[in-house]
Image (cartoon, grey):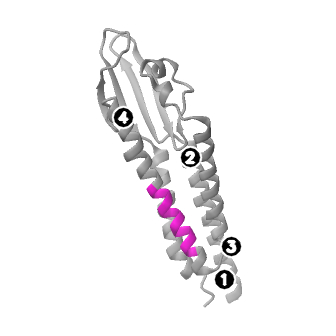
């Protein structure tokens, strides 16, 4: 009977690692930051979206050319590196469930910490730093002065998105799993 409970705990813990790994992938697919651009005459001009893997030019032709964002579009090799990071961290989260208690606990906790730091640096250093070059706030309304060939004012409402928060949640859950691992997988 006690062995059956131990196996059940192993399966539950393994299932939780699969859930956390899925959250990491989902956070990469969802946008981390968006900026809705509008003007007085035209109304809504378009939306700029930044993902974990970078800024994609797809879907904001008018906005992208107006703000010279084509120069900020993430190059293909950086997209590939970002997806390699996502695949590696996801694979290592899953692999950590196969390791012995202390090694597995250390690995999944470290991965959670790395994922949180990655998300915070990406948003509050990289994205916020580049937005400040355009005098755009990370969150909220900004009046934009740029070389758009329009005579009316242009504004942007920007906000952090669920993908960013989900990356932080997934990292936090990794740390929680690392702390619970020794308790959950203890044979006694």
Q: Which element type, helix, strand or loop, lies under badge 3?
A: loop
Check disc 2 and report the residue beneath it.
28
Percent coordinates x, y for residue 148 in the rendering: 38, 14
Image-based side of 33 in relation to 134, left or right: right
Percent coordinates x, y for residue 24 in the rendering: 57, 54
Q: Nearer the viewer, mark 3 or mark 4?
A: 4
Q: Earlier in the sequence, mark 3 or mark 1?
A: 1
Does the magenta segment cover residue 95?
no
Q: Earlier in the sequence, mark 3 or mark 4?
A: 3
Percent coordinates x, y for residue 106 in the rendering: 54, 74
How far separated are the C-alphas under marks 2 and 1? Answer: 35 Å
Check disc 1 and report the residue beneath it.
5
Which secondary structure dominates the residues rendered in magenta? helix
Magenta segment boundaries in residue numbering: 105-117
Check disc 3 and report the residue beneath it.
98
Q: Earlier in the sequence, mark 2 or mark 4?
A: 2
In percent of the image, x 40 and y 23: which residue is there? Answer: 37
Q: Earlier in the sequence, mark 2 or mark 3?
A: 2
Crowding around mark 4 (Cα neighbors within 10 Å: few <14, some 14 to 19, many 20+) is few
Crowding around mark 2 (Cα neighbors within 10 Å: few <14, some 14 to 19, many 20+) is many
User: Looking at this view, is 46 or 19 the one in front?
Assistant: 46
In percent of the image, x 54 and y 63: which residue is there? Answer: 111
In percent of the image, x 63 and y 63: which residue is there? Answer: 92
Residues at marks 2 and 4 touching, judged by CB atoms closer than 8 Å: no
Crowding around mark 1 (Cα neighbors within 10 Å: few <14, some 14 to 19, many 20+) is few
How far separated are the C-alphas under marks 2 and 4? Answer: 21 Å
Check disc 4 and report the residue beneath it.
131
């Amino acid at each position: 009977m006690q062995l059956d409970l131990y196996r059940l705990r192993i399966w539950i813990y393994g299932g939780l690692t699969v859930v956390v790994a899925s959250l990491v992938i989902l956070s990469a697919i969802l946008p981390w930051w968006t900026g809705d651009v509008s003007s007085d005459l035209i109304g809504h001009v378009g939306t700029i979206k930044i993902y974990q893997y970078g800024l994609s030019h797809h879907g904001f032709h008018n906005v992208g050319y107006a703000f010279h964002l084509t120069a900020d579009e993430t190059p293909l090799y950086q997209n590939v590196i970002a997806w390699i990071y996502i695949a590696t961290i996801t694979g290592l989260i899953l692999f950590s469930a196969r390791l012995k208690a202390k090694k597995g606990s250390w690995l999944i906790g470290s991965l959670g910490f790395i994922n949180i730091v990655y998300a915070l640096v990406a948003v509050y250093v990289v994205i916020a730093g580049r937005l400040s070059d355009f005098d755009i706030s990370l969150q909220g309304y900004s009046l934009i002065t740029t070389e758009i060939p329009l005579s009316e004012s242009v504004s942007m409402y920007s906000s952090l998105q669920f993908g960013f928060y989900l990356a932080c949640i997934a990292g936090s859950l990794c740390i929680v799993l690392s702390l619970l691992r020794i308790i959950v997988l203890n044979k006694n």
